[in-house]
Image (cartoon, rainbow, N blue to C red):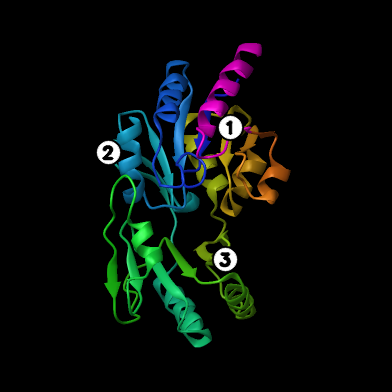
Amino acid sequence: MYKLIATDVDGTLANDFHNVDEDNIKAIQKAREYGIKVVLCSGRSPASLLGYEKKIGLDKPGNYGIGFNGAEVYETDTRNIIKTSSIPKEVGKKIVKIIRSLSDEIRIMFHPNTQSAIFDEELSEYFEKYSSGVEKIPVKRVLDEHITEDITSLYAIEERPLLEKLKAEVESKNLDSFEVFFALDNSLEFMPTNVNKATGIRALARHLGIEMHEIVTVGDNYNDIEMIKEAGLGVAVANAVPQIRNLAGFITRRNNNESALAEVVDMVIEENRKM
């Protein structure tokens, strides 16, 4: 029997305007009535997820969230941290130095703890979009390249060909304490070693006494690969990238603009009835 649904937010639960529609909200409430926990599992920071959690009703006691692609697992009501991982600040400085040596065109964003900060000469459209949505998250403009804290995640944003060069350059340096992967076609993400959405879900599952085979994961993009592979049932929404669709055990008929999660909830409830 499935006891928990972990869903990605952008491109999965939320529509292209970064909103969660009423059908998905009602479906999440329905899942909870059937005893199924619903957890947001996103590359966003917990601060960025708070607005979604409040709108959906997942900010009450007994609810949990997973941010920074699995690096932070927390209680949504208290914001208490269950599990966290980070990249040492000295390693973060080296990453930024490599990026700047390759190109000044690459935009950089990093998260110290749950705040957002930017190394940039101007606030680009990307960061304006990041700070929009259900709840605006302030972004801090940083004019120098001094990382003063360990960081939870760092993003390099540019066109894919340049980011491919950056990925190869970084990997050639044999640095430790982090992994690098494409979260989106135009976003290269640096995360603490051995951290992804699946590791975050496993940490929460241990905390709750739930087995991985009792969990359904729902996603659309590259940073959802591990959780799609390791869950009891991995679900791809209709608009998912081909790699996710190929890995999924179920593909929705609806896309993220058509309340895809509501379809997933109905399917999970029906499957539970058969068990």
Q: Residue furthest right?
A: 246
Residue 166 found in image quarter: bottom right
Crowd rating for badge 1 (residues with CA inside 10 Å; few <14, some 14–19, many 20+):
many
User: Whole-percent x and y of residue 258?
Assistant: 52, 34
Question: Relative to 103, is 148 above or below?
Answer: above
- Name the residue beneath numbered marker 3: 180
User: Whole-percent x and y of residue 136?
Assistant: 28, 52
- Amino acid type, residue under disc 1 in the picture: Val
Tell which circle, 1 or 3, labels the residue nearer the N-terminal end. Answer: 3
- Name the residue beneath numbered marker 1: 216
Which mark is in front, 3 or 2?
Answer: 3
Tell which circle, 2 or 1, labels the residue nearer the N-terminal end. Answer: 2
Tell me what residue is drawn at x 58 percent, y 32 percent. 216
Question: Relative to 149, is 35 above or below?
Answer: above
- Which quadrant is the N terminus positioned in? top right
Crowd rating for badge 2 (residues with CA inside 10 Å; few <14, some 14–19, many 20+):
few
Q: Residue 78, which numbered label?
A: 2
User: Whole-percent x and y of residue 265?
Assistant: 53, 25
Question: Relative to 271, is 255 above or below?
Answer: below
Tell which circle, 3 or 2, labels the residue nearer the N-terminal end. Answer: 2
Which mark is in front, 2 or 1?
Answer: 1
Judge by depth and name the residue closer to the eye, 79 or 55: 55
- Residue 139 is at least partly visible in this image: yes
Judge by depth and name the residue closer to the eye, 41 or 250: 250
Distance in Å between CA atoms under marks 1 and 3: 25 Å
Q: Which residues are magenta?
A: 252-275
* Dominant secondary structure of the residues highlighted in magenta in the image: helix
Tell me what residue is drawn at x 41 percent, y 52 percent. 44
**Horizontally, is 206 left or right of 270 in the view?**
left
Distance in Å between CA atoms under marks 2 and 1: 25 Å
